[in-house]
Image (spheres, helix red, strand yellow):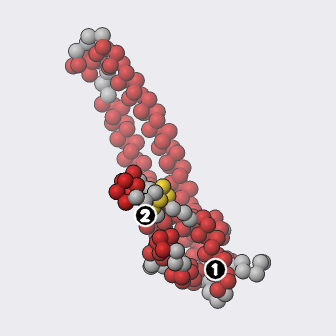
Amino acid sequence: MAKNQINFSKMTETAKKQLDTFKSASYLLASEDLRYKAEKKSLQTELNLILKNRQNDLDNGLSLDDVVEKYPRIEVDRKIKVALDAHNATNAPLNEMLKESYVFIPDGMYEAYLRKINDGKRGDFLVCIRVFLDNLGIEGLKQGQINKFAERMSDMFGSKYATSKSIVNDGKYTTVMKKQTFNKLFMAVFCDMAM
């Protein structure tokens, strides 16, 4: 093992299970997202055909009432709603599983990230990284190990392109991610690095 490398096998069993839960929930959410997008695309194609046929008949002089009766969309609209409801029902417990895995992220981690990005101050971020690793059961680390690990994790984080409103109103072209997005990314980066 390299000089400043951390031995992640020292994590508690609870931490390992929680990280496995994070990875599993992330995978299931991604799979569900792909499934839903494919179903939604198919239904949208069906709806677009109805709308196209309606417009053709309207252009050819058929009355709106006749067009609506000839090409009803209520069934497709119902299928779209059912698909969305099923998607949301599937995602709700998976999102809760993700949030529960954030328990290892110490209070103040997000604020430390903001200070690191916005003010260039990384001290609090290093302290939070140490607490995070302690929360996982990895104790007795040297400062060099903490610094190297924090630097590697930081390389995986980044700012994002600002919204149009931020650019116009604040003159800022980059912005930081929201706390929930940060927590999800933090855990994902950790899983990729450590497991």
Q: Position of residue 1 (x, y in %)?
A: 78, 78
Please determine whether, in this image, residue 18 is positioned above or below residue 68.
below
- Going 56% across and 56% down the picture, which residue do you hit? 27
Could you tell me which residue is drawn at 48 percent across and 74 percent down? 119
Amino acid identity at mark 2: Lys
* Distance CA(mark 2)–CA(mark 1): 24 Å
Query: Would you say residue 117 is visible in this rendering?
Result: yes
SS type, badge 2:
loop
Upstream in the sequence, badge 2 or badge 1? Answer: 1
The image's mark for residue 178 is: 2
Give the crowd class for mark 2: few <14, some 14-19, many >=20 residues within 10 Å: few
Q: Is residue 67 left or right of residue 33?
A: left
Residue 148 in the image: state x and y as whole percent: 66, 77
Q: Mark 1: which amino acid?
A: Asn
Which residue does the numbered mark 1 point to in the structure image?
A: 147
86 and 34: which one is in front?
Answer: 34
